Each structure stands twice: as structure tokens, then as C-alpha cells.
Image (cartoon, rainbow, N blue to C red):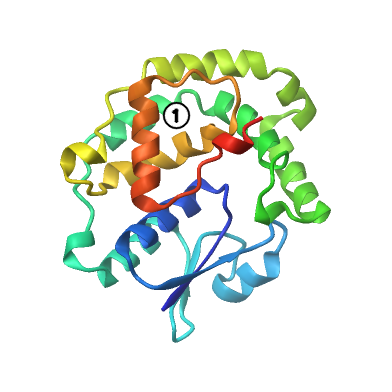
Amino acid sequence: MFTLYQYLHCPYCVRADMVANYSGLAHKKVMLLNDDEKTCIDLVGVKMVPILQTENGDAMGESLDIVAKILAMAPQDKQLLPQSDAGSVTEYMGEYGSAINHLLYPRNIMIEQPEFDTQSARDYFQHKKEKMLGNSFDTSFENSDTYLEQVNGMLAGMPTLTLPSTRGNQLSWDDVYIFPTLRNLTMVKGLAWPEAVLNYVVEVASLTNVHLYNDQAV
């Protein structure tokens, strides 16, 4: 049995978590506090997540390397379908990265998540991310309407996403790249989800047993 060290909100952690769940392999999940630098440094020498630790104590970081490691252990019927459209879709979503971050970062500590169970963990995250945003979380949240308009435009223009149900409920490499960002956006109230995009998010979440935030959205 391997162990995954992760955060609930981290899109890179979602990559590893969704493949671990889909694989059916027995594993343990450890949700770290966001300001827990020591555990990460002890395991891989740097603060990062996700981290996979094998039964013999070996540990590794980098989400795509972890996905490859899990797939190497997974049965043949739980391998991923090849990548096809991920590059163009992620490039498209990347154009809206700033607006997405302004929506998500403040909300990450407004809702209940295990990595933010302490005030010090919330403060650690806020201090770091406000530097990236160039303004306070309060300012980003107060300007939500501006960012909602931009991200709603992104959702309205999303390229066609292939539903797992149309390919035998198999997970693909495309999903590993595309799904985590869309999943995190479920924590944002006021988004207008096109039916096709929402169906994609729901199907991949169900297939991979990944938590959505709809009931917590703010």
C-alpha cells in the first residue's frame, strides 16, 4: 500500500488522487496542513505536494511522475486512454488563469478544507497567494463580478469535452490535465455552467471519486 500526501484544493494533488482512486489500488491519504513544511522537506527535500510514499519508505513528488508511478502498479484495465485534446483545452483555459486565481484563492480559505484547519495554515496560504495576486483576498473577493464575467465567458466558449460515458467510462490523460481546474471552480457561486461542461465535471468526479465543492460554493 502506498501513501499520498496532499491537499484537497490543490489541482496537482487532484491529478494524483483521481488516478489513484480510479486505479483501484489500496492506498492511504494524508491531508497535510498548508503550513506543514517539515513533513514535505523530510520526505522529498522541498515543500511540495502531492507526495507519494511507497511501503519501503521511498518518496517522490511531481504530480505527473506520481501518476506514472501509480499507473505502473495499476491493472491493465485501469490504464489511461491516450492524450488527444488536452493541450488545446488547457491553453484555452490558461488565458483566463488570472481571473480563475482571483476567484479561487480567497475562497479556498473561506470554505472548510482539512489543509486550512488552523489559523496559521490559512495565514500561510493567504500571505503567499496575495503576493501572487498583487492584492488582498478581500479585494479579489469584492471584485468577484469582474472575474465571474471573464470565467463565465471561458465556460461558454469551452472546446468540446469528451464524456467518459461515451468511451466506456474509461479515464484519459486528457482528463488528468483538464478536470482539476474545472473541479476547483465548483467552489465559486455565480458561474453559469454549460450543460456539456457540467456533465463532464460530474462524470469525471464520479468515475474518480473526487470531491466537488457545489455544496460549499461561495
Q: Position of residue 116 (x, y in %)?
A: 72, 52
Q: Position of residue 75 (x, y in %)?
A: 21, 68
What residue is rendered at 28% in x and 30% in y? 161
Query: Which is more toward the observer, 212 or 49?
Result: 212
> Does residue 212 appear to the left or right of 1 in the view shown?
right
Query: Which is more toward the observer, 218 or 159?
Result: 218
The residue positioned farthest toward the front in the image shown: 215
Q: Position of residue 38 (x, y in %)?
A: 69, 70
Q: Secondary structure at mark 1?
A: helix
> Does residue 167 appear to the left or right of 96 in the view shown?
left
Query: Which is more toward the observer, 78 or 159?
Result: 78
What residue is rendered at 29% in x and 41% in y? 174
Q: Is residue 191 above or below residue 211?
A: above
Image quadrant containing the C terminus: top right
Q: Is residue 133 above or below residue 1?
A: above
Q: Would residue 91 be visible to someone looking at this image?
A: no
The residue positioned farthest toward the bottom in the image shown: 56
Q: Position of residue 17 (x, y in %)?
A: 44, 57
> Does residue 171 appear to the left or right of 168 in the view shown?
right
Q: In the image, what residue type sits under mark 1?
A: Gly
Name the residue beneath numbered marker 1: 94
The residue positioned farthest toward the right in the image shown: 119
Q: Is residue 93 above or below residue 213?
A: above
Q: Would residue 22 be visible to someone looking at this image?
A: yes
